[in-house]
Image (cartoon, helix red, strand yellow):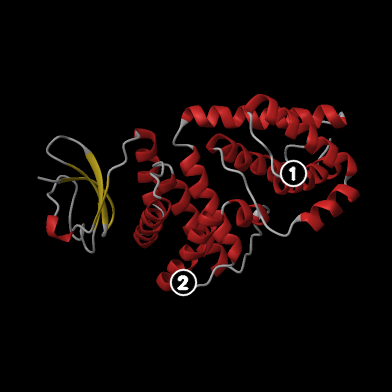
Amino acid sequence: MMVIYKIFNNNAVVIKDEKGVEKIVMGCGLAFKKKCGEEVDVSKIDKVFILSDPEVNNKFQEMMTYIPSEYVELGEEIINYAAKALNKTLNDTIYISLIDHLYAAVKRYQDGISVKNAILWDIKRFYKDEYKIGLKALDMIEERFSVRLPDDEAGFTAIHIVESVLSENAEDMQKITEIISEISNIVKYNFHIYFNEDSVYYYRFVTHLKFFAQRLLEGKTYLDDAQDDLLYTVKTKYVNSYECAEKISKFIKTKYDYDISNDEKLYLTIHIERIVYKAVL
């Protein structure tokens, strides 16, 4: 027996099963002319959400009060597609972050507001699989809502997926945070600076380091072809930043036995140059 505990709209309710477990169920007309305490028509249920984390469950229920159910359904489709494509389990928190983002992104587009993704450049190169999923999500959004969002939004979707996988392991998150701090300190001490943490360049830098740290822990090295000419140009133009990248490379090799490829040095140098000369106090 499923008894209605809370009603969001005609198509979505919270029920408590015979064991007292809360579940969010959705279906067309599921709650039409229904009241709390009444039984739900099981034949009308299309989707069932059971979120194990109580905090995530509460936030999800709060989100359901202002986000139409079609966005929740689409979000679940994208999440399931991502989990299958990556062959990974995504943390429940993505149900909050991604669905809320989808709704906001479509509303912004409809209002004529465009938001640039400051780290799209990194995402395309370092998280190609997640970015492809983001592009697929744009197709799914267009099919459902008849709007074509810009590729920047594919990057935002990719970020939510990456962070959902990262947050799966608290120990890894602690290690990632440690690596980010270590590299940041090398840059600060090398140039004798303090970062403006409100700067977009700082955001890009830290996000880049988060991605790098994840690859380090997974033992993956980023490789891209035909970058030698660009690396030579960057080394020549950004001498001090490249020397700092070399220091970081030696530190990482010594402490983590991880070889930073020339391609990674290239992008690290560019980020160091930006943060040192555009994001200091």
Pick the residue in front: 15 or 187: 187
Pick the residue in front: 169 or 269: 269
Q: Is residue 97 visible?
A: yes
Q: Which residue is mark 1?
A: 265
Q: Is residue 41 visible?
A: no
| Among the two numbered marks 2 and 1 on one chain, the one whose residue lies closer to the N terminus | 2
Q: Quadrant of residue 268?
A: top right
Q: Secondary structure at mark 1?
A: helix
Residue 219 vertical position relative to residue 2 in the rendered view, above or below: above
Instruction: Give the CA distance from mark 2 to mark 1.
Output: 38 Å
Residue 118 vertical position relative to residue 113 in the rendered view, above or below: above
Q: Amino acid at mark 1?
A: Lys
Residue 204 vertical position relative to residue 45 in the rendered view, above or below: above
Residue at x 76%, y 48% (from the top left corner): 266
Residue 193 vertical position relative to residue 273 in the rendered view, above or below: above
Residue at x 12%, y 38% (from the top left corner): 18
Q: Position of residue 26 (x, y in %)?
A: 26, 56
Circle on res. 142: 2
Q: Position of residue 269 (x, y in %)?
A: 79, 44
Dot 2, how many residues are within 10 Å of its Cα: few (below 14), some (14-19), or many (20+)?
some
Q: Is residue 48 left or right of residue 75?
A: left
Q: Position of residue 253 (x, y in %)?
A: 69, 30
Q: Secondary structure at mark 2?
A: helix
